[in-house]
Image (cartoon, rainbow, N blue to C red):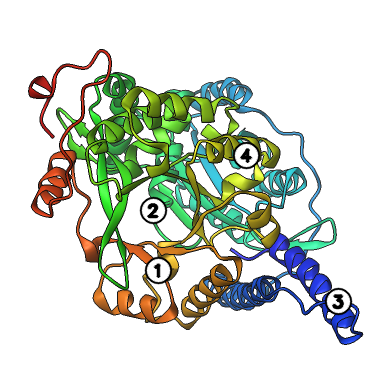
Amino acid sequence: MIGMVTSLLFLTLGGLIATSVMRYLADDAAAPEPGLIVALLLNIALLVIGWRRRRDASLGLDGRSAKGLARAAPRLRRPAAILDRQSFLDQGATMLLRAQRLEKSMAVLVLAIERDRGAGDALLRAVAGEIAATMPPLALTAQIAGDRFACGFLFDPDARTAVDRVAERLMLSLAQPFEIDGHEVQIRCTLGGARSNLECATMEVLLQSAEAAMAVASKTNGNRLAWFDRATQEALWLRQQLESALPMAIAREEVVPYFEQQVDLSSGRLEGFEVLARWQHPVQGMIGPDVFIGIAEERGLIADLSLSIMAQAFRAARDWDPGLSLSVNISPVQLRDAWLAQKIIKVLTETGFPASRLEVEITEGALFDNLPLTQSILGSLKNQGIRIALDDFGTGYSSLAHLRALPFDRIKIDRSFVQLLNRDADSAVIVNAIVRMGESLNLPITAEGVEDPAIAARLLALGCAKAQGWHFGRPLSIAGARRMLAERRLIQQPGPPLPGEPPTSQRRAG
C-alpha cells in the first residue's frame, strides 16, 4: 500500500508545514492549518506501517528460498520488446504446434501486478524485462492488458516440476525491489498457470485457463500462485456462461439493488442506505457483485449496469422518508465518460427521485486516471445538489490537495481498517488519523464494514459520525427494505405517477 507516491506526499507536505512553521515563528503568518498537520501525521503513519510490512514480507521471502537468497539490492531492469495479446495468441499457436511435433508440452503463465498508482510505464517495462529474463530460452512474453502479463514456453511432460520451478523463480525475482527514476518500487503479483493437455488443446483455451487460475490465486493473500485444475475449469465455464448472460440480465433487470443501512452512531437513527448490486440468476441463484462486476467492466457493460441499478433504486425509494439518502458507487471506468453527470441527472429526472437525497461515491484510485475530467463530472453533479463521497479512504494515495480540489462532502473509511480496529494497532492509528483529518476539514466520516458492537463503540469514541455494516443488519432487497421502513413508519403516501407510469394500484409491489 505504501510506495513512491506516499513518499512524495510526505516530502511535499513536510516542506509546506516546515515553511508555515518558520513563518509563524517569525510572526509573519498565521499558525499552520490543522488539516495540513493531520494529513502529514497520517502520511508518516502510513510510511512507517508500509516499511514494517515490507520488512516482514522480505523476511518471509528469504525463508521460502531454497538457496537462502538474500534480499537483493534495487536493480534497474532493461526494457523489453514484448508482444501484445493477439500476437501472443498467434505465436503461441505456432509454439503449441511445435510442442506437439516434438512430443513436448506447453505452459502458459499469466501474471497480474499490484503497484503504486504513481509508478507508470517505466515500471511496466522493467517488469516485462524481468519476466523475459527469467523465462527459459525461446519463451514468449507479452503484455496482454495494462498490469497483466503472459509468458509461454515448452517443457518435457515427464518433468512437470520444471514448470513449477520456473514459476517460483519468477515470483522470487519479481518480489525484489525495482529501481525506477531513482526510487525503490515494490510490487505484488498474482500468478496463474496452465499446461497443455486434452482440456487445453488450443492456445486461446490455454490462455483463458491460465487467466482463470490467476483469478483463483487473487482471492488469497500475499504473492500468490495457482494452477489450472478441474475446479478452476468449472469456474471458467461458469464465468463464460455469466459473460454471455449478463447483457440480457441487465436489460431484464435481473441485476437488482440491495440496500445496506447507514446509521448515525450517536443516536442509532437510520440515515440512509448504500445501494449494492445482486444478480438474481434464474439458474445459479443469487450472485454477488464480486463475481459479475469485473465481468461488466471487462465487457464494457458497467455503465448500463450502474444506471439500471440506480433507476430501480430511485423508483423504489421515491416514497421513502425524505430524510433517507441513497449512496451509489461509481466505477473508475464510468469516470472516463464526459457525459456521466448528464446520464445520472437523466435517471433522477425520469424516476422523480430528488437529487438532494443522492450521494455519489468514488474511490481513491479513480482520482488519478483523469483528474480534470473527474473535477468536471463531480462539479456538474454538485451543481444539481448531489453530494459526493470519497470511498475506501486509506487504501490509495489521495492527498490534502485532492480533498481540496474536489468537492467532497464525506469521507468513507475502508472496511479493511475498520474491521481490525480493535485488533491491530496500525489500523487504529490510521482510523484515528482519518477521523481527526475529517474534523479539521469539516468533512463527516462514515466507517464501512462494522460487524460488531465493540467496533461501533470504538468508532463512536473516536468521533466517527456514521457507520454501516452487518452489525446494523444484512443488505435488504427492495421488498425487505420496504417492510422494515413500513414498520418504522418511514414510508410516505405515494405521489402521483410520473408520465408513462401506471397508477399506484397497478405498480409492482416492493
Element under disc 4: helix
Upstream in sequence: badge 1 or badge 4:
4
Q: Where is 123 relative to 140, above or below?
A: below
Circle number at residue 188: none
Give the image location of residue 78, x and y in percent.
Answer: 81, 47
Upstream in sequence: badge 4 or badge 2:
2
Give the labeled residue for mark 4. Answer: 374
Identity of the amino acid at label 1?
A: Ala
Q: Is residue 344 left or right of residue 476?
A: right
Residue that sits furthest to the top in the current view: 500
Q: Where is 85 relative to 114, above or below?
A: above
Identity of the amino acid at label 4?
A: Thr
Callouts 1 and 2 close, C-beta under 8 Å: no
Element under disc 3: loop
Upstream in sequence: badge 3 or badge 4:
3
Circle number at residue 465: 1
CA gap between label 3 and label 4 equals: 34 Å
Give the labeled residue for mark 3. Answer: 29
Which residue is painted at 36% across and 70% down in the image?
419
Upstream in sequence: badge 1 or badge 3:
3
Identity of the amino acid at label 3?
A: Ala
Q: Closer to the camera, 432 or 157?
A: 432
Callouts 1 and 4 close, C-beta under 8 Å: no
Upstream in sequence: badge 1 or badge 2:
2
Identity of the amino acid at label 2?
A: Lys
Which residue is painted at 58% across and 34% down in the image?
380
Q: Is residue 268 left or right of residue 126?
A: left
Q: Closer to the camera, 477 or 349?
A: 349
Foreground: disc 1 or disc 2: 1
